[in-house]
Amino acid sequence: MKDATDVCVNAKTLSKGAVRHFYDALGQRAVKTDVLADDGDSFEGEGVALMLGAELRGLYIYKAFASLQAGTTLYYPYGGMLVEDRFTSRHQVLIKSLTRELQTDSKVQIIMSLEQQPAMPLSEIAADEAFWFAQGFSQLDIQIHYQGKIKHDYTQKQLNFSVTDYAGGDKATNAELCHLYREAYKKRTGIPDITPEGINKQLSIPSCSYLIMRHNNELIGQCSLFISDEECYVDSIYVRRSYWGTGAADKLTQSLFDYAEKKGCQTVSGTAASNNQASRALMERFGLVAQYQVKRVLFSL
């Protein structure tokens, strides 16, 4: 029998069942497999797959986001290769196909998250890093993942800050939130832009909530979070720079803990860049503990 050869195909040629079975074998949940109920239906996501004959060996799905950097599109691919094919020439073929797929006339940045690593780096992660660097990726940052139980014994002064739950839909508030977000992240690479419409769309997700902080009617802080299975994941939290050191960040953090508890959560988790000492100190002050880190790498086209 003739040996099967590697072929890269568009993910839309796959069935939902094939995608589900692949992620089951991969041991990840990069897509919500509960929406892939009908094995016979075609997969509708954007992505590139590597086939060995009729067998799906590797898959990266992706979605485009406008960047805070003008004229740049961000892609966050999710997926990978089956265990025995990681860090091999077969994996390289899939990555090259992915970069070709995303090549455009405008600037493109592809951001990959490497394997979860211990909070303190070990030599075993060298193969993972070396593989991606050999494909032309460079280090973007290191994200530290924190987790801890709901805490109430933090003592804080009574400050003139108000924190409320925001359901979306107000044009003026959405515009303020976009301005605050861009102000907070404008100096960081690989950050997607945000729009008023995007805020409403995000808040239409049942698990998503926003808390907003005001001082004398000025919007000075925001926290977005997702609640699922008694876990509160903090997607973002920031306070206007002019209010740093005033206790505003502590007030906003305690408010999100209180909100999470009311929603039945047992724990709170979130991430902070390894060089963001202020965010890391805030999490640790509220009892969150570093669990692991993820190194992110960047490829520019």
Image (cartoon, rainbow, N blue to C red):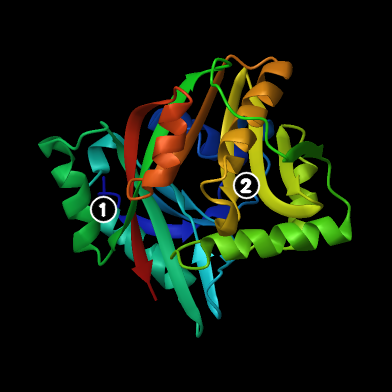
Q: Nearer the viewer, residue 37 or 286?
A: 286
Amino acid type for the residue under numbered disc 1: Arg
Q: Is residue 55 visible?
A: no
Q: Residue at x 58, y 44 (%)?
A: 237
Q: Which one is earlier in the sequence, the residue at label 1 or at label 2?
A: 2
| Percent coordinates x, y for residue 33 in the rendering | 60, 32
Q: Nearer the viewer, residue 145 or 98?
A: 145
Which picture quadrant has residue 159?
A: top right
Which picture quadrant has residue 250?
A: top right
Amino acid type for the residue under numbered disc 2: Phe
Q: Residue at x 33, y 31 (%)?
A: 292
Does dot 1 land on a helix, a strand or a loop?
helix
Q: The C terminus is located in which quarter? A: bottom left
Numbered disc total:
2
Could you tell whether 83 is left or right of 143 in the image? left
Could you tell whether 100 is left or right of 36 in the image? left
Q: Residues within 10 Å of mark 1 (few under 14, many from 20)?
A: some
Q: Which residue is mark 1?
A: 90
Does dot 2 land on a helix, a strand or a loop?
loop
Could you tell whether 74 is left or right of 110 in the image? right
Q: Nearer the viewer, residue 77 or 177?
A: 177
Query: Residue most toward the left?
Result: 123
Is 86 situated above or below 117?
below
| Percent coordinates x, y for residue 126 in the rendering | 14, 45
| Percent coordinates x, y for residue 270 in the rendering | 49, 35
Between the C-alphas of marks 1 and 2, the distance is 23 Å
| Percent coordinates x, y for residue 245 in the rendering | 51, 46
The tag on residue 43 is 2
Q: Is residue 251 visible?
A: yes
